[in-house]
């Protein structure tokens, strides 16, 4: 890997890690990228962040327009790894503690999950060394 490319990857990873330490106000979707591939998160078609392999964090929905929110996880090649749509009813149920949503996809490169208004998900085995990256 070229040094400038490595540095860019490192800076993106640090930015995502730093963002995950900042408290999120309002509704948020939890992201778990238990894969060996960076995953770009888009909300209603707009980039909201990139999560490094093994990273987890929250993506704020406030300031991203009105519901419904379509949250999409995309690999570097443009493959949609998983997606979730949250309606106003979903947001209200989550706020009231009456429900939540979790979706995920298992790929040879690992597992990618999105969740809203739920506790921590069950653990996922790490990706074995040598697996190909996500498509």
Image (cartoon, rainbow, N blue to C red):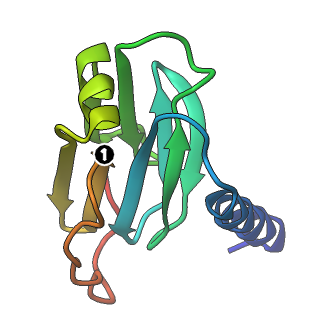
Quarter of the picture holding the N terminus: bottom right
Q: Residue furthest top?
A: 66
Name above or below for residue 94 compared with residue 46. below
Q: In the visual, does 59 lie left or right of 16? A: left
x%, y% of residue 85?
27, 25
Disc 1 secondary structure class: loop
Q: Does 37 sit left or right of 117 as displayed?
A: right
Q: Position of residue 86 (x, y in %)?
A: 29, 25
Nearest the camera: 57 or 77?
57
Query: From what the image shows, is residue 11 above or below residue 64?
Result: below
Residue at 31% x, 48% y is 114
Callout 1 crowding tier (Cα within 10 Å): few <14, some 14–19, many ≥20: many
Q: Quadrant of residue 112?
A: bottom left
Is residue 64 shown left or right of residue 114?
right
* Residue lying at 22% horizontally and 83% vertically, measured from the top left: 125
Horizontal and vertical percent position of residue 82 = 26, 42
Q: Is residue 130 above or below residue 38?
A: below
68 up-or-down from 98: above or below: above
Q: Look at mark 1 in the image and give the residue it sits on.
A: 117
Count all numbered tags in the image, as a single digit. 1
Please state if 57 lies on the left or on the right of 35 as rendered: right
Q: Residue furthest front?
A: 96
Identify which residue, 91 or 61, lies in the foreground. 91
The location of residue 123, given as percent across then percent down, is 23, 78
Picture residue at 54% right of the left edge, 12% below the top? 65
> Looking at the image, which residue is at 19% across and 61% down?
107
């Amino acid at each position: 890997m070229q040094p400038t490319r490595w540095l860019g990857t490192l800076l993106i990873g640090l930015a995502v890690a730093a963002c995950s330490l900042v408290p999120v106000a309002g509704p948020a979707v939890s992201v778990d990228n238990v894969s060996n591939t960076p995953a770009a998160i888009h909300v209603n078609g707009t980039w909201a962040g990139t999560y490094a392999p093994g990273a987890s964090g929250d993506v704020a929905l406030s300031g991203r327009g009105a519901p419904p929110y379509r949250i999409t996880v995309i690999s570097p090649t443009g493959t949609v790894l998983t997606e979730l749509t949250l309606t106003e009813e979903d947001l209200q149920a989550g706020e009231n503690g009456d429900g939540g949503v979790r979706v995920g996809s298992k790929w040879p490169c690992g597992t990618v999950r999105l969740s809203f208004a739920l506790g921590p998900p069950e653990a996922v085995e790490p990706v074995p060394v040598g697996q190909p990256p996500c498509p």
